[in-house]
Image (cartoon, grey):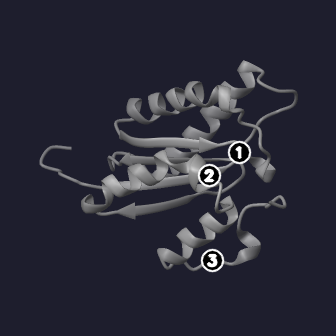
């Protein structure tokens, strides 16, 4: 797109189906590299990526050449196929339906990158459910609790 200039920073959050702790830490680097490859091959810039056993945080410089929902659909579909092909555990891996996406100004990029990098220590104090609801409230997202992820008891 000639003469089109954008600066869009989006944090994407999505969870393992049933909020199961299926992503073992020994696989974190492999799956993060795989997802980074998808993001970059689609023309976006990976700013930060980290995951817990039950959810992912991805922070990108978003290029508006495709819809955000299309990008996330491809991220979730391709990464679940990749995980299933690796046979990291018995059964079929999949992500829960839905996701959170939150936009940030340029002045917040460093802070969000550090926040995502520190997920492991952050979740020693706060559950994913608490974190996710806090994000929705911080960004004044109108939501109905019954339509949030299927939560397992923390």
- In three-dimensional space, the C-alpha distance between marks 1 and 2, rounded to whole angstroms, equals 7 Å
* Apparent side of residue 9 relative to residue 27 in the rendered image (left or right): left
Position of the C terminus by quadrant: bottom right
Residue 84: which quarter of the image? Answer: top right
Percent x, y of residue 97: 70, 54
* Apparent side of residue 35 relative to residue 114 in the rendered image (left or right): right
Kindly identify the residue that appears in the image at 69 percent across and 61 percent down: 127
- In three-dimensional space, the C-alpha distance between marks 1 and 3, rounded to whole angstroms, equals 20 Å
How dense is the environment of label 1, judged by Cα within 10 Å: few (below 14), some, or many (20 and up)? some
Do the numbered discs 1 and 2 sit on residues whose CB atoms are within 8 Å? yes
Against 103, is 22 above or below?
A: above
Percent x, y of residue 151: 79, 61
Kindly identify the residue that appears in the image at 68 percent across and 34 percent down: 80
Circle on res. 95: 1
Numbered disc 1: secondary structure: loop
Numbered disc 3: secondary structure: loop
């Amino acid at each position: 797109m000639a003469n089109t200039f954008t600066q869009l920073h989006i944090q994407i959050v999505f969870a393992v189906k049933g909020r199961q702790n299926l992503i073992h830490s020994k696989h974190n680097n492999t799956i993060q590299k795989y997802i980074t490859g998808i993001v970059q091959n689609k023309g976006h810039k990976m700013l930060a990526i980290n995951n817990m056993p039950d959810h992912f945080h991805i922070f990108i410089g978003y290029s508006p050449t495709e819809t955000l929902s299309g990008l996330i659909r491809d991220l979730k579909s391709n990464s679940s196929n990749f995980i299933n092909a690796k046979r990291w555990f018995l059964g079929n891996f999949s992500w829960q339906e839905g996701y959170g996406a939150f936009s940030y100004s340029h002045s917040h990029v460093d802070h969000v990158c550090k926040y995502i990098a520190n997920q492991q220590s952050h979740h020693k104090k706060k559950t994913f459910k608490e974190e996710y609801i806090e994000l929705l409230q911080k960004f004044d997202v109108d939501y109905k609790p019954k339509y949030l992820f299927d939560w397992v008891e923390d």
